[in-house]
Image (spheres, rainbow, N blue to C red):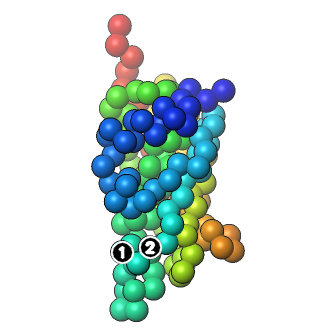
């Protein structure tokens, strides 16, 4: 069973992640060791000469927040669980499609959680970006 519910996660990000409404990131689901988040395509999130591709910072924010959801699914509402490393490989542009991020645990230890995120185009499922990240979990206080 997940250590955090969807409403609990939404409450945390509302308080601690002011960029979420700016980018329109929606948490679709969260379960033990997995999470799915989504960003709807909007004109203000596009870049490029033809304004035909979602800005990479939006994809990176989506990937990092998905990692965070996966981590909290293991440890619950832990203050100061932070990204220690993250690598994002953008492999395609979503074009006019919204994007969906599917995250899952690769390894969960006491102090570090490593997870992977695959971002796909919502309309046809083609891969847009792959991410691997590590989060540090603070030690429990006695």
Classify the position of the N terminus by image quarter: top right
Classify the position of the C terminus by image quarter: top left
How far across and how far down the image is residue 9, in percent? 47, 36
Q: Does residue 123 appear anywhere in the picture?
A: yes
SS at circle 2: loop
Asked whether 44 or 64 is in front, the reply is 44
How far across and how far down the image is residue 68, in percent? 46, 42
Above or below, 99 relative to 93: above
The numbered disc on residue 139 is: none
Q: How many marks?
A: 2
Above or below, 102 relative to 121: above
How far across and how far down the image is residue 135, in percent? 42, 40
- Farthest residue, direction bottom: 50
How far across and how far down the image is residue 20, in percent? 38, 53
What residue sits 36% from the left and 92% below the top? 49
Q: Report which quarter residue 117 is drawn in.
A: bottom right
Q: CB under 8 Å between callouts 1 and 2?
A: yes
Asked whether 55 or 135 is in front, the reply is 55
Q: Does residue 86 appear anywhere in the picture?
A: no
Mark 2, Cα crowd under 10 Å, few <14 / some 14-19 / many 20+, is: few
What residue sits 44% from the left and 73% below the top? 42
The numbered disc on residue 42 is: 2
Could you tell whether 4 is left or right of 42 in the image? right
SS at circle 1: helix
Mark 1, Cα crowd under 10 Å, few <14 / some 14-19 / many 20+, is: few
What residue sits 54% from the left and 53% below the top? 37
Above or below, 69 relative to 46: above
Q: Which residue is mark 1?
A: 44
What residue sits 33% from the left and 46% below the top? 17
- Farthest residue, direction top: 142
Could you tell whether 115 is left or right of 138 in the image? right
Question: How far separated are the C-alphas under marks 1 and 2?
Answer: 5 Å
């Amino acid at each position: 069973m997940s250590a955090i519910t969807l409403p609990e996660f939404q409450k945390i990000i509302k308080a601690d992640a002011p960029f979420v409404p700016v980018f329109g990131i929606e948490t679709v689901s969260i379960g033990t060791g997995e999470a799915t988040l989504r960003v709807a395509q909007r004109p203000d999130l596009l870049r490029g000469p033809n304004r035909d591709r979602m800005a990479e910072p939006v994809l990176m924010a989506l990937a990092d927040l998905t990692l965070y959801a996966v981590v909290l699914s293991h440890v619950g509402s832990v203050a100061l669980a932070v990204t220690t490393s993250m690598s994002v490989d953008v492999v395609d542009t979503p074009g006019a499609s919204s994007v969906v991020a599917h995250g899952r645990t690769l390894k969960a230890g006491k102090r570090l959680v490593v997870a992977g995120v695959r971002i796909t185009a919502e309309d046809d499922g083609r891969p847009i970006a792959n991410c691997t990240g590590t989060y540090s979990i603070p030690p429990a206080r006695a």
